[in-house]
Amino acid sequence: MQNTTTEQWNNHTAITEFILLGFGETDKLQILLFLVFAVIYILTMTGNILIVILVVSDQHLQTPMYYFLGNLSFLEVCYSSTILPKMLARFLTGDKTISVSGCFTQFFCFGCFISLECYLLSLMSFDRYVAICKPLHYAIIMNGRIILHLLVGSWLCAASISVLTISMVSQLSFCGPNEIDHFFCDLSPLLQLSCSDVSRVKLLAFIFGPIDILPPFILTITSYVCIITAILRISSATGRQKAFATCSSHLIVVSIFYVTLMIVYILPNINSLRDLKKVFSVPYTVLTPMVNPLIYSLRNKEVKESFKKVLDRFICFREIKRVFLK
Ligand SMILES: *[C@@H]1O[C@H](CO)[C@@H](O)[C@H](O)[C@H]1NC(C)=O
């Protein structure tokens, strides 16, 4: 069956668009999925844009921890915008096509942003580790220049891996079928459709997947284990409870992110795992960007205070306008 379709397609010119099959949803389900993902996208954008505004505008949030948080939130805005708007449009219109160049662009941005997300999450946990476990060295280790280097280094590393991958993927030919069994253009569903020899790209993904994911994962887990050990030594019970609650919520979200990533990108690509991998792609593409601003700022006094100040100023402006413009 597969072979005849391929042969039929081979007689045609190269394909110009792909079809994203998504979750294989029916018409009724589409509306429900649209509503769910629209709410997720709105929450993600609002939360993260708010954090970026607070970090950039508030003097009190000009510390390394908040630089990382601001950069992470900025990244989440870009990251979820590479996948969700296209997905929402698909649910709404039922049009499942995506142009080949659009698909490559989505894959490139996604690859770059997801690597960066791994690096930033691990840098943030390392930052907390130094602040809690090595407080005397904090100012030396986390100074502005080092942070800038770490951030620029992360961007460069993520971008170069993505450039390398996309330059190889864009040389592949696709002669059909053109149905991508996924909800966005990811590497392995794309490779399944290619009629060129994909062994080199597969080898590259086999090497870079773990390089991208495992070191940040190990750094993150080690940092949190050290932090939690330090917290358990705090003598006051309430202090211990509060710190523990904050840290464990970070650890849970970060673990879900990395574990689902590893299931999708490190486990072998066998057929029985394909649907499972699609489902496990949801947490790290859609949920982490939404939850991160909440867990990193809801329990955080400084962010809350900064938010209140902005709100006050806003309300104050409104009052002034009302009084003077009447
Ligand atoms: C990202 O980090 C740099 C510090 O290296 C900081 O100057 C900048 O404001 C941060 N960006 C955001 C959006 O917080």
Image (cartoon, rainbow, N blue to C red):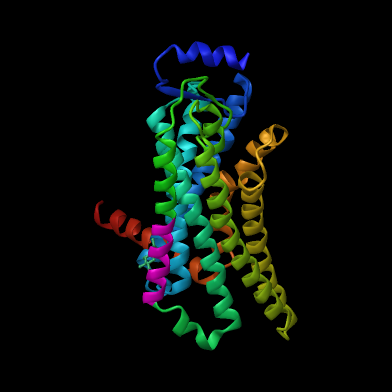
Give the answer, above or below, for where 134 lies relative to 48: below
Residue 128 lies left or right of residue 81; in this view the side is right
Q: x%, y% of residue 290? A: 55, 50
- Residue occupying the point 53% across, 88% down: 136
Q: Which of 35/166 is in front?
A: 166
Dividing the image into 4 quarters, which one contains the N terminus? top right
Q: Within the magenta stretch, is there residue 211?
A: no
Specify the quarter for ligand 1.
Answer: bottom left
Q: Nearer the viewer, residue 213 or 302?
A: 213
Q: Position of residue 216 (x, y in %)?
A: 57, 62
Residue located farthest toward the left when viewing the structure as drawn? 325
Q: Nearer the viewer, residue 256 or 301?
A: 256
Drawn side of residue 227 relative to residue 184, left or right: right
Q: How many marks?
A: 0
Figure check: 118 above or below 243: above
Residue 324 pos. (x, y %): 25, 57
Where residue 59 sits in the image (x, y, percent)? Answer: 37, 73
Q: Is residue 150 visible?
A: yes
Residue range in magenta is 144-157
